[in-house]
Amino acid sequence: MTARFTGRTVLVTGGGTGIGRAVALAFAREGARVVVAGRREEPLKETVVLIEAEGGQATAATADVTRPEDVRALVALTVETYGGLDVAVNNVGTAVPPAKVADIAEDDWHTVLSVNLTGTWLSMKHEIDHMRTHGGGAIVNIASNLGAHLRKEGLGAYATSKAAVSALTRSAARDHIADGVRINAVSPGPVDTPMSTRPGESPADKAERMRRDVPAGRAGSPEEVAAAVLHLASDEAAYTVGTELVLDGGVTA
């Protein structure tokens, strides 16, 4: 194992479960000090325990990324705790019940746009504000293969929010690379997390659906997404700006 992030501070939103937890663990294993953030305290503490059990450093911070004051305080806490902010991974996301566009409930529309898009923008706003005056940094947003790359019936709200994250990532990358802030995105397809499991679906049913629907024959793992995130955040990707790395087993190939 290398130590690409020794001495660096990484903020991971949505770090209590799934992809976020895998990302936080992967950064800690490569030497980073990690702040894991989200709305629910208990899963965040569980992530910290897992990191510390492997000898890493981590701090849990409760925050709602749709609230400007929470995001501002989160970045301030990260800097106060570890002395800076070098990498940010904006992973918070939510989905709403499937519905055709004309049938989407207004509250569902506002929720998915608020969390997935506005939450990503607010997070970047305050992360960049610190990074551009403290030597730069790297940001990786978690978008989706649904949106800019793929549409499915009944998922218009989610796809719209994630397509907007893709566009926002590229715009921010162009705006702030001269400030020393390098911004990219990872866009997963089906990943083996609860979000990709349909209501009432058994593990065997899900595995069969993945074999049928994904050219690679399976769902991705959170660890595979984490590996892509770490690459984009590392010095190895220093010339990679405004890129969206799609990991979906060939679904959109």
Image (spheres, rainbow, N blue to C red):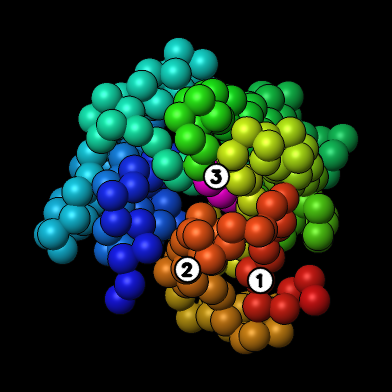
- Residue drawn at the location 44% of the way across and 18% of the way down: 72
N-terminal label among 1 and 2: 2
Which residue occupies the foreground of this view, 160 or 173?
Answer: 173
Residue 168 at what x, y percent from top left? 73, 38
Which residue occupies the foreground of this view, 119 or 175?
Answer: 175
Looking at the image, is mark 2 or mark 3 nearer the viewer?
3
Residue 70 at what x, y percent from top left? 42, 19
- Kindly check if marks 3 and 1 are in contact, taking CB atoms under 8 A apart as contact: no
Q: Is residue 128 above or below residue 21?
A: above
User: Is 224 one of the magenta-colored residues?
Assistant: no
Q: What residue type is disc 3 on? A: Ile
Which residue occupies the foreground of this view, 103 or 16?
Answer: 16
Which residue occupies the foreground of this view, 33 or 202?
Answer: 33
Q: Secondary structure at mark 1?
A: loop
Residue 49 at what x, y percent from top left? 16, 51
- The residue at which mark 3 appears reads as 139
User: Is 141 one of the magenta-colored residues?
Assistant: yes
Side of 17 where 156 appears, left or right: right
**Residue 114 makes an appearance in the image:** yes
- Residue drawn at the location 51% of the way across and 55% of the way down: 233
Q: Which mark is residue 248?
A: 1
- Magenta segment range? 138-142
How many neighbours does mark 3 have within 10 angstroms: few (below 14), some (14-19), or many (20 or more)? many
Q: What residue type is disc 1 on? A: Asp
- The residue at which mark 2 appears reads as 227
N-terminal label among 2 and 3: 3
N-terminal label among 3 and 1: 3
Image quadrant in which you'd find residue 10 = top left
Image quadrant in which you'd find residue 82 = top left
**Residue 26 makes an appearance in the image:** no
Residue 104 at what x, y percent from top left? 77, 34
